[in-house]
Image (cartoon, helix red, strand yellow):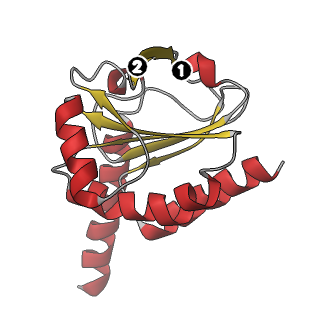
Amino acid sequence: MRKLILLTLTFVALQLVHSADKYTLLQNGQEAPNFTFQKDTTTMNFFDYKGKVVLVNFFATWCPPCKKELPLIKSDIWDKHKNNSDFELMIVGREHSPAQLRKFKAERGYDFSFYADKNKKIFESFAKDIIPRSYVIDKNGIIVYQALGFNEEEFKKMVMVVDSLLAK
């Protein structure tokens, strides 16, 4: 009976992983899409960041795994690399306005920038659904790592990828 339960749980887990993958539009090794966004009062293009390692994280203020991941992004990635001119961190608030993100940032005391994606235009150039979702993009604009959801082991891998790219 135990084997049957274990087999069933394994099957369900594999189905969830497979079904989540149908929401992913980009694969490692592909060029990251270009998109426009507001940085303060300036309209920017993502391709302006070519030549830098970029971590793009999609989140929502109501998402419990997102709220668990953001403090780790701050402590394990941002605090370590924020003064490195070869690094950019983009925390993108899916379906949030700039005002909502300013409030969230102030309440949590974050010192990195948040980018509003009110209509999911940026998000939908990467994926169809499911957050949190992170992409590490190398200096050539190529996606070298992506994470769907949040778990600590996967997060540690992402930190190692960012660290190794910035050590080059």
Q: Quadrant of residue 39?
A: top left
Residue 80 position within the rendered picture, expressed as x and y whole percent measured from the top left: 62, 61
User: Could you tell me the amino acid type at mark 1?
Assistant: Phe
Residue 121 position within the rendered picture, expressed as x and y whole percent measured from the top left: 31, 18
The N terminus: image quadrant: bottom left
Please give the label number shown on residue 46. 1
In the structure shown, which secondary structural element does the residue marked by tag 1 occupy? helix
Q: Rate crowding at label 2 as few (under 14), some (14 to 19) or many (20 or more) other CA atoms within 10 Å.
A: some
Q: Rate crowding at label 1 as few (under 14), some (14 to 19) or many (20 or more) other CA atoms within 10 Å.
A: some
Rounded to the nearest angstrom, the CA distance separating label 1 from label 2 is 8 Å
Residue 50 position within the rendered picture, expressed as x and y whole percent measured from the top left: 68, 24
Q: Is residue 164 above or below residue 10?
A: above
Of all residues, the one furthest to the right in this rendering is 168
Contact flag, marks 1 and 2 (Cβ < 8 Å):
yes
> Nearer the N terminus, badge 1 or badge 2?
2
User: Could you tell me the amino acid type at mark 2?
Assistant: Phe
- Looking at the image, which residue is at 28% across and 37% down? 93
Please give the label number shown on residue 37. 2
- 103 and 134: which is toward the camera: 103
